[in-house]
Amino acid sequence: MAGRDRGDEGSAARMAVTSSGSGWTDSGRTSKIEVLQKCSTSIFTCRTAILGGMTTSSTATATTAAAPGTPAAPAAPASGMRGRKRERTRRAIAEAAFRLFADEGFDAVTLTRIAAAADVAPATVFTHYASKEDIFFGRRLEFEPGIAEAVRGAATGPELIERLRRACTEAVGTILAADSLPQARTFSRILLDSPSLRRSYLPLARERRDQLLAALLERAGERAADADVRDELETFASLAGAVRELGFDAVHAALAAGEPAEGVREAAAAVLDRGYGRLARAYVDAPFLDAG
């Protein structure tokens, strides 16, 4: 029943953001304020349902406050024997941490316990990771959609939206690959069961949104100096980012509920296809989305 309840809530939440109607555009182009007024309530209601109300061990609602020690990006791999040894140590720490997180819950595990489980000194853990959150989210870039590549390769607005949808779909496929799926299930279950992790997860969504906006502004070229164009691109980045986050929220919910890989894929596709499809219709006449 837990899986069914999560799926039902996820469907209801997804419908909230994708059923805002054709009122997004009055003349083919809507201002930032109008769009955000229509969408913000649905978006944050949806994310709260998935990241807060769907957990089995906690009913705490996720907040938008950034937690201390927001996870940093993984360190670039070093070369040579020393680099390989460093990477082995880093991976051993992460594997020990995930075993503890899975068995005892993220919030109950200390860095000292992780060091003991990995058979290293506590100082060694801090050499590789700034916090528990850093360990937990350490491999996230391996599974991030290729947003910058999608933006750079698109000539028109419709092509841009389709490339963003495809990048997210491909990232889901990477997560669901046979060698990634078991860890992905563990990751999603730990994430949804930990209030502190959910608080740390939300700033990452803002980070991804900012990365998308930066790529859009670079692509716009000289037009990015126009305040109206910047506002339009900021609005688009917020909405496209929200669709991306909702799609991956659906992935986490389905994985944590024990859905088979194909069911997870379908849940994500339902959100991504509908969300990006609605964006394509809302931005059908949006020259500011064309490459500069």
Image (cartoon, rainbow, N blue to C red):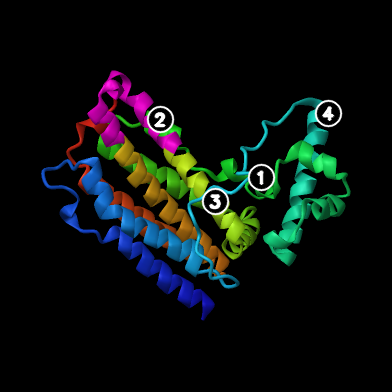
Q: Residue furthest left?
A: 27
Q: Are marks 3 and 1 in contact (CB under 8 Å)?
A: no
The residue to which callout 1 is attached is 134
Circle 4 sits in a helix, a strand or a loop, which is it?
helix
Circle 3 sits in a helix, a strand or a loop, which is it?
helix
Q: Is residue 185 left or right of residue 61?
A: right
> Which numbered disc, 3 or 1, marks the residue that appears first in the sequence?
1
Query: Would you say the magenta stretch is mainly helix, strand or loop?
Result: helix
Q: Residues within 10 Å of mark 3 (few under 14, many from 20)?
A: many
The type of residue carrying mark 4 is Met
The residue to which callout 2 is attached is 215
> Which numbered disc, 3 or 4, marks the residue that appears first in the sequence?
4
The type of residue carrying mark 3 is Tyr
Residue 193: give its label.
none
Q: The magenta stretch spans which residues?
A: 210-233
Which mark is in front, 3 or 4?
3
* Mark 4 vs mark 2, CA separation in Å: 36 Å
Residue 201: give its label.
3
The residue to which callout 4 is attached is 81
The type of residue carrying mark 1 is Asp
Q: Are marks 2 and 3 in contact (CB under 8 Å)?
A: no
Please tell me which residue lies in front, 118 or 80.
118
* Mark 3 vs mark 4, CA separation in Å: 34 Å
- Give the image location of residue 156, x and y in percent: 26, 32
